Amino acid sequence: NNQVCDAWNGYDEAQCGIQASSSSKILIKGGTVVNAHHQEIADVYVENGIIVAVKPNIKVGDDVTVLDATGKYVMPGGIDPHTHLAMEFMGTETIDDFFSGQAAALAGGTTMHIDFVIPVNGSLSAGFKAYERKAESSCMDYGFHMAITKWDEVVAEEMEIMVKEKGINSFKFFMAYKGSLMINDELLLEGFKRCKSFGALAMVHAENGDAVFEGQKRMIELGITGPEGHALSRPPMLEGEATSRAIRLASFVNVPLYVVHVMSIDAMEEIAKARKSGQRVIGEPVVSGLILDDSGLWAPDFVTAAKYVMSPPIRASGHNKALQAALSSGVLQLVGTDHCAFTSTQKSFGIDDFRKIPNGVNGIEERMHLVWHTMVESGKISLTDYVRLTSTECARIFNIYPRKGAILAGSDADIIILNPNSSFEITARSHHSRLDTNVFEGMKGKGKVEVTIAGGRIVWENDQLKVVPGSGKYIEMPPFSYLFDGIEKAEAKYLSSLHAPVKRFNSAT
Ligand SMILES: NC(=O)NCCC(=O)O
Ligand SMILES: [Zn+2]
Ligand SMILES: [Zn+2]
């Protein structure tokens, strides 16, 4: 039973059985295998979901599916560090659930994503349970970050359980969304301290939520109620301020920091400054911020303009190019999507008031193609950089490398074959998300993912998806990634620097 399960029309679990075992042995022949630090012409042999060998001229028997990759690139499947599938947000729920969002991802060459668990009434364990259920229909591997939306002793204890028992090694703190997800600096500090003690990565949505609230009031008072009011109410300076504050507080606590969806030069420059000073700060741009500018938000018709509403907002032209440069120069380290899909009907909740437009855009299916087109085709980055930015660095940061993010013997068989001479075109008509719009509508480019292999199964070939609900695995992510290496030495140095003034003070009194 090897059914094609249609993510748009839903799927019939009875029909979408476990795939035939014929694809459990695969040989990819003659392609250029690209890893983050090396590329070579080699064959890749896969058995039972694992890469068994990577070398030239592998000979196999008749029971093996052979894919010819001559003239093409064989690369680790993309890992998207930032998605929101089946997320309840702003009075509604994202249209892509774990099945449809992942099917779309696979069609675009992404084979793993990390989604954000939102606590239920502040409870991390209730949130985790809810997301376990949401993810039951998964057709590709996934991991979880956890959001922290309130603070008390229970939350502090549950953080430890999440890290030690549930495979979560990162916590996101929202500095925006006043009145719902936003936390204050006191909570941010408490959370950072806890993250540090468990070797978990602290992540921030960096916008000054109080100032955004004020900005929104100003817009409404001026009679600006359309989608453009969204961008006008939360300018780049508010993203820069929050990024700087989070960076300084992380430095104060001496914990590594990950800034999600870096959308502006203002935020990027704060990250650049901190990294230059030696602080461990990771900056994640998302594909919408890298590629688009804010012109769509000014479209005269609401449906078009509202589809671009996300937070922080898509910025004026110039920010995107600066973020691309920061990515190629190493100031920013990996690319996510923040895939958070709301239909035009859902977006129309805010037809009279931009504050009610559900925030979020698509990208999970488009990221690999758009980063290829914008960064590799244009000569801004190398092939190996492409693999690092779309896959390997994410695996390293979240401590699952080299199981993920590499084409090496022993790694999971999550592989794409990209044809640099073939082309792609993005339209809502043909994409695999359930969304009825696409913020990248009409974009075309060279370099197409022709085959996706996830967990050793060929799930995308000849423009056809073959996905099996329930086949995706939850990937536990252990704490203390490389970002924590040596951090206690820096701490010891800091503490010893305090001794001199303390001694001076003691001898004077
Ligand atoms: N980014 C956005 O607009 N929606 C998703 C929630 C978040 O990441 O802030
Ligand atoms: Zn966010
Ligand atoms: Zn997000």
Image (cartoon, rainbow, N blue to C red):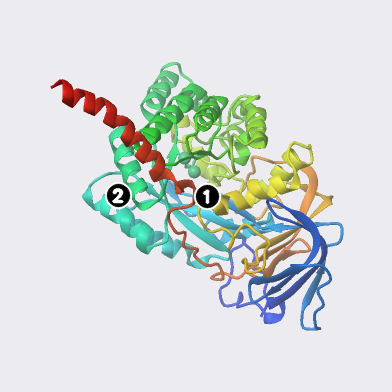
Q: Residue furthest left?
A: 509
390 versus 69 height, above or below = above
First-in-chain label (1 vs 2): 2
Q: In which quadrant of the rendered view does residue 395 lie? A: bottom right
**For the residue labelled by badge 1, is the local secondary structure a helix, a strand or a loop?**
helix
Residue 397: which numbered mark, if any?
Answer: 1
| Cα distance in 3D space between marks 1 and 2 | 26 Å
Residue placed at 32% from the left, 56% from the top? 160
Instruction: Report the quarter where the C terminus lies.
Output: top left
* Badge 1 residue CB within 8 Å of ligand 3: no
One can see residue 358 in this view: no
One can see residue 2 in this view: yes
Neighbourhood count class around disc 2 (C-alpha, 10 Å): few under 14, some 14–19, many 20 upward? some
Instruction: Report the quarter where the N terminus lies.
Output: bottom right
Residue at the disc numbered 2: 122
Q: Position of residue 143 (x, y in %)?
A: 49, 58
Q: Residue furthest bottom?
A: 62
Specify the amino acid type for callout 1. Ile
**Closest to the observer: 469 or 221?**
469
